[in-house]
Image (cartoon, rainbow, N blue to C red):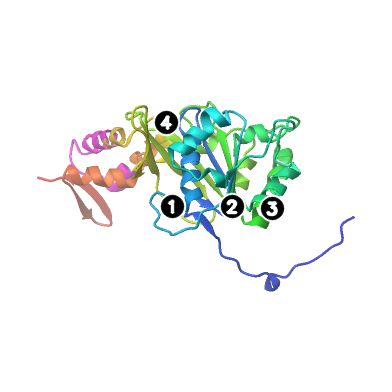
């Protein structure tokens, strides 16, 4: 039986979070990057690895940084025909990117080689792609008690070595549902991770992909960041992109949402003024953000007037 030990909060030292990429990927914690197959999540993480291996600035982040060593494990793509060509396309320093040899024994999250490799290489980031392949064949990813113990152990390793552990995963096939319900397996995956990112394709611009924040426990959620995957011109970063995570996964573009907002406002004001609260509630129910609603309101020259204690919207005369 374990001996009882009590820790007083006055004995606990305050520690600041160290960031690999603020506010998307913290050091010393678990981060999940998931998306539907073929949407570009592996390409995204390899481009980030290339930048980090050279100590270059990351997208939408001017922080100066030193090059870091990285461990990249994949159970889906060939190292020579897929992974290295993608790293070279990003001008990666391949001397800083390592792979644990799985040719004789497959790797799992609880494998002692994970911690040994971090110790030996000094890696500040380890990527498991896809995470489902590294749970172990006897683990049921839908059972919370089995998943929780594995992720807790992995989290302790991340914290011990101040290493960012990235779990790359697939989404389930429940199209049209909110992002919170699209992760594969137990909810403990997303509950344990301190940052969860989703990668998706902009439906009316299929070469444009977006990384959006689904969960951020350690900082305010970051703005979505877009990149382009073009068969002829390859990969390049676009920058911040105005789209919600649910719109990204449901297939609604910002343009489509603007059209929906315009129809909503014109319908509500067709016979005169309408309570502001009514319009805003209808917009929320339709998944139209306040930013888009306000932008469309301004473009339609809609005025706000106060009658008694209530605000109304009406079209300008």
Judged from the image, the secondary structure of the residue bearing numbered disc 2 is loop
Q: Which of marks 4 and 2 is nearer the N terminus?
A: 2
Q: Is disc 3 placed on a helix, strand or loop? A: helix
Rendered location of residue 282, percent (x, y): 34, 39
- Mark 2 is surrounded, within 10 Å at the Cα level, by few (under 14), some (14 to 19) or many (20 or more) other residues, namely many
- Secondary element type, mark 4: helix
| Viewer-nearest of discs 1 and 2 | 1
Tell me which numbered mark, 4 or 1, is placed earlier along the sequence.
Answer: 1
Q: Give the residue number, with chain letter if any, for mark 2.
A: 124
Q: Identify which residue is drawn at 21% across, 36% down.
A: 266
Residue with the mark numbered 4: 250
Q: In which quarter of the image is the C terminus?
A: top left
56 or 250: nearer the viewer: 56
Between 24 and 44, the one lying in front of the other is 44
Tell whether position 275 is magenta: yes
Magenta residues, start to end: 259-280
- Residue 271 falls within the magenta-colored stretch: yes
Mark pair 3, 2: CA separation: 10 Å
The residue at which mark 1 appears reads as: 56
Labels 1 and 3: the sequence-earlier one? 1
Residue at left offset 70%, top offset 72%: 11
Question: Of tags 4 and 1, which is closer to the observer?
Answer: 1
């Amino acid at each position: 039986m374990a001996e009882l030990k009590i820790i007083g909060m006055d004995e606990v030292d305050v520690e600041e979070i160290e960031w690999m990429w603020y506010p998307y990927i913290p050091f010393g914690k678990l981060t999940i990057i998931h998306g539907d197959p073929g949407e570009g999540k592996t390409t995204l993480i390899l481009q980030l690895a290339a930048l980090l291996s050279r100590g270059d600035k990351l997208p939408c982040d001017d922080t100066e940084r030193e090059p870091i060593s990285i461990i990249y494990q994949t159970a889906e793509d060939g190292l020579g025909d897929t992974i290295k060509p993608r790293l070279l396309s990003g001008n990666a320093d391949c001397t800083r990117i390592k792979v644990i040899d799985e040719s004789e024994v497959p790797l799992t999250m609880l494998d002692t080689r994970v911690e040994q490799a971090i110790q030996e290489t000094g890696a500040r980031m380890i990527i498991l792609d896809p995470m489902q392949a590294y749970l172990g064949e006897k683990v049921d990813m839908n059972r919370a008690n089995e998943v929780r113990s594995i992720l807790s152990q992995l989290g302790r390793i991340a914290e011990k070595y101040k290493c960012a552990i990235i779990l790359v995963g697939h989404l389930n096939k429940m199209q049209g549902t909110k992002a919170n319900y699209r992760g594969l397996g137990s909810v403990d995956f997303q509950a344990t991770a301190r940052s969860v990112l989703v990668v998706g394709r902009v439906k009316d611009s299929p070469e444009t992909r977006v990384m959006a924040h689904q969960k951020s426990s350690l900082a305010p959620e970051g703005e979505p960041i877009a990149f382009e995957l073009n068969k002829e011109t390859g990969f390049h970063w676009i920058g911040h992109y105005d789209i919600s995570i649910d719109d990204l996964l449901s297939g609604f573009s910002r343009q489509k949402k603007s059209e929906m907002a315009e129809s909503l406002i014109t319908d509500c004001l067709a016979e005169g003024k309408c309570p502001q609260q009514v319009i805003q509630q209808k917009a929320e129910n339709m998944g139209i953000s306040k930013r888009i609603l306000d932008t469309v309101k301004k473009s339609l020259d809609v005025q706000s007037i106060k009658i008694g204690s209530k605000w109304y919207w009406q079209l300008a005369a």
